[in-house]
Amino acid sequence: MNVLALIPARGGSQGIPRKNVIPVGGRPLICWSIESALAASAVTRVIVSTDDDEIAAVATSAGAEVPFRRPAELAGPEITDLPVFVHALTWLADAEGYHPDLVVHLRPTSPARPPDLIDRAVALMSAQPEVTSLRSVSPARQTPWKMWAIGSDGLLQPLLGTLEQEAFNLPRQALPAAWLHNGVIDVIRPEVLLAGSMTGRRILSLPMGEDDGIDIDRPDDLPLAEAALARLGADAQSGTVAPPRAPDEPSPGRAPGSSISSSQ
């Protein structure tokens, strides 16, 4: 099976300048994702999609391929993931005749991945051919059942449920568990991407712990990422991996996955 790990990393960054190559944990940020991909036995190819010469040089030095430069029109802050992935797949098909069976999406801004995470994700997708994609998720610290929209008349309307149901007045423990897409890993079938979707209709979950969803978007996320990488290093030395945290168990720091940063 051909499994492509694709790491999107544009040169521009609004929250943290040159974010994808800033030092984190003693190495450029993007190197953590490249090393995770190279260490995964299921991954057969690691490619970085970038418009930036410095990122390309760092990525190549770390062992990734950078066979093309992403066009400038696909490197702006408003660009979503889909056209970036379609461009990469189209270029590889046209230039090399290369067609992967699965695409692993690794965001450079989520550097702290358990060592077996990628292989587990690929195995789950391989075992369920009817699934169109997989996404890692973390427990939501705030339940959407207690969130509101404000109407044009200034009145509150529940985001979920109805006013008559009054789910928003129930204790959190009585409400359905909620999970956030944390951006640590996605796996997508290439035919789904080429058909115009990052997920398709059958999205498999890969639950992770609440502390496992660190995503670097602002300067104050950097210490959280450093701490998460240190925990992973300690776990690797001890041979332990922390189990997923229950959705109602508290955790310090900013809510993981509260916003997935634009690293693509």
Image (cartoon, grey):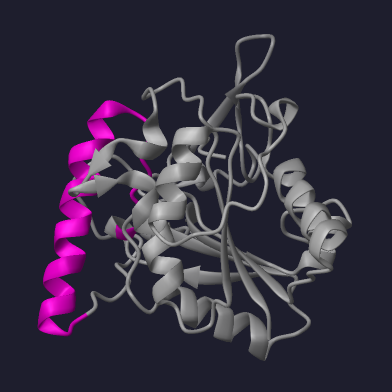
Of all residues shown, which one is farthest toward the top? 153
Camera-side residue of 239 and 205: 239
Image-based side of 214 in relation to 127, left or right: left
Which quadrant does the C terminus fall into?
top right
Q: Position of residue 45 (x, y in %)?
A: 58, 70
Camera-side residue of 148 and 230: 230
Q: Position of residue 196 (x, y in %)?
A: 85, 51
* Residue 29 in which image quadrant: top left
Task: Look at the image and tell me whether residue 211 can be seen.
Answer: yes
Q: Is residue 185 above or below residue 131?
A: above
Q: Which residues are magenta?
A: 212-240
Q: Is residue 1 above or below residue 262?
A: below
Q: Position of residue 191 (x, y in %)?
A: 84, 66
The residue shown at (50%, 71%) is 206
Please tell me how many numbered marks the rendered image carries. 0
Find out whether residue 20 is within the magenta segment. no
Find out whether residue 220 is within the magenta segment. yes
Image-based side of 81 in relation to 32, left or right: right
The residue shown at (28%, 76%) is 243
Q: Position of residue 137 (x, y in %)?
A: 48, 61
The residue shown at (71%, 32%) is 74
Camera-side residue of 2 and 121: 2
Task: Look at the image and tell me whether residue 259 can be seen.
Answer: no
Which quadrant does the N terminus fall into?
bottom right
Q: Is residue 129 above or below residue 229?
A: below
Q: Main secondary structure of the magenta part?
A: helix
The residue shown at (75%, 85%) is 129
